[in-house]
Image: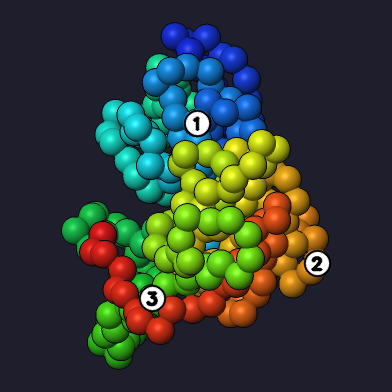
């Protein structure tokens, strides 16, 4: 089970299970709350995606660092140390320490095989060469479409919003792409994460419905879905234009 251990000046403060995801920041609605001026209201998030655990900086003021390197998005490995402000979060994932599969001996090594073993080894090498020669050349990844939120009803600063970032927030917070207006609106009501398969909406606070059905936790978005986020009504649809992913 992946987890994060919060530390400050070498002292262990608390452990957090990553689960489907968590957020890190100064605001009290985060999973990991770090009350420090160097930490943004919603600083970063950690979530599971396609079998990996991903760290993503949420456009924080002072940045997020992993093993001393400034990072906007990366897959975490067990033992990585995240730096958020003056605090550290140590990532642990015990599944990564599973035993490695046995390897065939290198051709340059001194290995003694009987005739039967030698024939079996040579046959496996011939099969590997044949598969390498017949394996198709991978194609360049296809351009990925961009989703858009169009305002149907409610107060908003724009009529529509392009979901180009890896994570787009809806809420009262200044970090939000779509700002909610009103005294009792949550700092972050909804997070919309972009993945290889499309977009996933995650409830963060307040009340959100999708097609008049309450959103409980996470839900993939489909073209034409109507979202009511604490009174702001938005329609999710795919933009006609496509954009290619930036080179890694």
Q: How much space separates mark 1 and mark 3, taking CA atoms?
A: 30 Å
User: Could you tell me which secondary element the residue under label 1 belongs to?
Assistant: loop
Residue assigned mark 2:
213
In depth, the one of 85 and 53 nearer the eye is: 85
Crowd band around label 1 with a 10 angstrom C-alpha radius: few (<14), some (14–19), many (20+): many
Q: Earlier in the sequence, mark 1 or mark 3?
A: 1
Instruction: Report the quarter where the N terminus lies.
Output: top right
Q: Earlier in the sequence, mark 2 or mark 3?
A: 3
Q: Is residue 55 left or right of residue 248?
A: right
Q: How much space separates mark 2 and mark 1, taking CA atoms?
A: 29 Å
| Residue 82 appearing in the image | yes
Q: How much space separates mark 2 and mark 3, taking CA atoms?
A: 28 Å
Instruction: Please say if 26 is above or below 178.
Output: above
Q: Residue at x 29, y 73 (%)?
A: 244
Q: Earlier in the sequence, mark 2 or mark 1?
A: 1
Q: Residue 204: x, y in percent?
A: 66, 45
Q: Is residue 247 left or right of residue 181?
A: left
Mark on residue 164? none
In depth, the one of 155 and 209 nearer the eye is: 155
Q: How many marks?
A: 3
Instruction: Please say if 173 is above or below 68.
Output: below
Residue assigned mark 3:
144
Q: Residue 189: x, y in percent?
A: 64, 47
Q: Residue at x 35, y 79 (%)?
A: 242
User: Could you tell me which secondary element the residue under label 2 belongs to?
Assistant: strand
Mark on residue 41? 1
User: Could you tell me which secondary element the residue under label 3 belongs to?
Assistant: strand
Instruction: Please say if 57 is above or below 105.
Output: above
The colour scheme applied to this rendered structure is rainbow
Outermost residue on the right side: it is 213
Q: Residue at x 62, y 20 (%)?
A: 14
């Amino acid at each position: 089970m992946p987890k994060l251990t919060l530390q400050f000046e070498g002292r262990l403060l608390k452990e957090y299970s990553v689960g489907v995801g968590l957020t890190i920041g100064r605001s009290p609605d985060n999973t990991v709350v770090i009350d420090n001026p160097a930490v943004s209201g919603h600083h970063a998030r950690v979530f599971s995606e396609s079998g990996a655990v991903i760290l993503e900086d949420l456009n924080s003021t002072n940045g997020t660092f992993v093993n001393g390197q400034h990072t906007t998005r990366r897959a975490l490995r067990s033992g990585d140390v995240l730096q958020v402000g003056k605090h550290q979060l140590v990532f642990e994932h015990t599944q990564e320490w599973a035993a490695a599969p046995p390897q065939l001996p290198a051709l340059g090594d001194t290995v003694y095989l009987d005739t039967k073993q030698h024939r079996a080894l040579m046959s496996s090498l011939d099969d590997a060469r044949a598969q390498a020669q017949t394996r198709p050349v991978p194609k360049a990844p296809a351009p990925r479409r961009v989703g858009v939120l169009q305002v149907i009803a409610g107060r908003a600063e724009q009529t529509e919003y392009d979901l180009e970032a890896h994570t787009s927030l809806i809420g009262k917070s200044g970090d939000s792409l779509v700002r909610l207006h009103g005294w009792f609106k949550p700092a972050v009501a909804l997070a919309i994460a972009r993945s290889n398969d499309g977009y996933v909406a995650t409830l963060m606070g307040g009340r959100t419905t999708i097609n008049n059905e309450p959103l409980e936790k996470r839900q993939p978005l489909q073209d034409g879905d109507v979202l009511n986020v604490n009174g702001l009504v938005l329609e999710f649809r795919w933009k006609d234009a496509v954009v290619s992913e930036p080179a890694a």
